[in-house]
Each structure stands twice: as C-alpha cells, then as structure tokens.
Amino acid sequence: MMYYPGEIAIRVFRACTELGIRTVAVYSEQDTGQMHRQKADEAYLIGKGLPPVQAYLHIPDIIQVAKENEVDAIHPGYGFLSERADFAQACVDAGVRFIGPSPEVELEENYQRAYSEALSAFGNGALFIERFLERPRHIEVQILGDKYGNVIHLYERDCSIQRRHQKVVEIAPAAQLDQQLRDRLTSDAVKLAKRVGYENAGTVEFLIDKHDKYFFIEVNSRLQVEHTVTEEITE
C-alpha cells in the first residue's frame, strides 16, 4: 500500500505492476480525481471530513485500511509521515511491514526526542556544537539495506548548489572528487548503516572542507526526491 499521493506513488505502482504485486492507494476527499488513485489496483478514502494534509497524517485511518484489506506492506514515499517513528511503530504493531527503517533507527525522530528531554530537564535543548566550514561541498551517499544486515551504496551525489537551504542542482557522480575520498565516503556510509541495522533506502550526508576532510551531517531515513538522479547512473 502506498499512502503518499502524487508522482512517487505512481512510480511505485509502476514498479509493483512490473513485479506482479497488487497495489493499494489511499486518498483524501479532495483527491478523488488524482492519478495515483486511478493507477492503483484498489483505492480507499481516508480522513473523511478532514483537510487534505490532515487526512494523510491521520495514522489510525491508514492502519485501519491496511488491516481491513490485508495489506502486506506500506510504502511511506517522502514527506508527511515518511520519517515519523510513531508511524513506523504503528505499522509494526499492526503486523504490517513498513518499507523504511525500523522505528529504532529513525534518527531525526530520536534527535527531536533527545532535544525535548534536554529542554524539559535542563531548560535548554542544545545537544552539540558543529564546526564552521567555509564554502564546503555537500555530498550525499545513497544507500540500500535489507533486514538481513546487508547494505550497499549506489554512489554519491553532489548537492552543493543550493538556495535558501534547498538543493537546486544534483550531480552524480560528484565531479572533481578524489577517488580515494569517494571510496572513504561510501565505505563510511555503509559502515554507519550496518552499525545501526538500517533497512531500506536512505541517504547519508556529508560536508567536505577545502582540505578534503569530511564531516557527517545526518541520515535521511527515507526515499529522497533526488533519488531519480541516482537512477540515471545505476541499473
């Protein structure tokens, strides 16, 4: 089942059809005419009486649809609930496979929880200090992991060209990147994912300074919009 509407749902449904897997979509009252609903084998209304955004954030309705229709797995897409540990846990509790990292390794959610705990205990949510890097390169490594502990990387993307903290241009593979540095980046990304038992698609992000020293930023524990760039350089 794909709970997220739009382009990513259509792409996932296309892949499932090629693999012979039946698909299920959910939609809000405002999205009855959306293409993702038409492309699925089955489609069900969620969030009745709610605005569209709230409808797609209504976890009980999503889980109810999955249970009532014997859904095997839920793909969260990107945005909305894709990085919410409570949604991943709700899927697990309902006996539905969550196509994403386990709730225990939803890193961003854990950071937010640590912030809240620090703020409550100390009146200050600060967690750590980051080094200032002048004009760094922003390199991200695409990874894939399975439930057996296997992790691979699908090379890197250079996303240094940004505007208002949003990526504008993605280049893969990264240009003018020393091969030894590339090997270290991809190797460390895989080691990190294996260490935490990471499953499914994710992106490990780094900053590289002018001396080719690199620093870990974060893991995006979901399928990113930019994954299509990686598709162009892999088979």
Image (cartoon, rainbow, N blue to C red):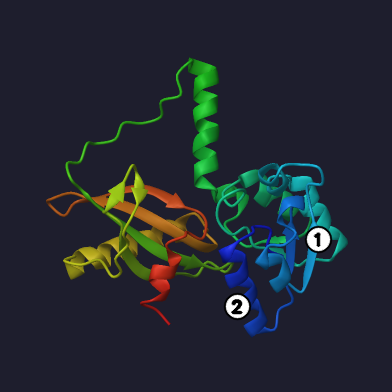
Real-space CA distance between mark 1 and mark 2, rounded to the nearest whole angstrom? 20 Å
Residue 12, placed above or below residue 50: below
Q: Residue at x 34, y 70 (%)?
A: 155
Q: Quadrant of residue 212?
A: bottom left
How crowded pointer 2 is (Cα within 10 Å; few <14, some 14-19, many 20+) is rated as few
Identify which residue, 106 or 50, lies in the foreground: 50
Q: Earlier in the sequence, mark 1 or mark 2?
A: 2
Query: Are circles 1 and 2 on residues that touch, CB within 8 Å?
Result: no
Residue 223, placed above or below residue 125: below
Q: Is residue 48 left or right of residue 209?
A: right
| Pair 1/2: label in front | 1
Q: Quadrant of residue 184?
A: bottom left
- Residue 153 shows in the view: no
Q: Is residue 121 left or right of residue 211?
A: right
Q: Residue at x 50, y 43 (%)?
A: 108
Identify which residue, 166 or 194, lies in the foreground: 166
Identify which residue, 217 or 171, lies in the foreground: 171
Mark 2 — residue?
A: 15
- Residue 96 shows in the view: yes
Q: Is residue 127 left or right of residue 50?
A: left
Residue 163 on image: x %, y %? 31, 46
Residue 28 on image: x %, y %? 74, 52
Residue 157, placed above or below residue 110: below
Numbered disc 2: secondary structure = helix
Residue 123 on image: x %, y %? 48, 15
Q: Residue at x 21, y 63 (%)?
A: 181
Residue 73 on image: x %, y %? 71, 65
Q: Quadrant of the C terminus?
A: bottom left
Identify which residue, 129 or 62, lies in the foreground: 62
Q: Which of the labelled discs sits on residue 220, or is there none?
A: none
Mark 1 — residue?
A: 44
Report how many numbered discs are placed on residues in the image.
2
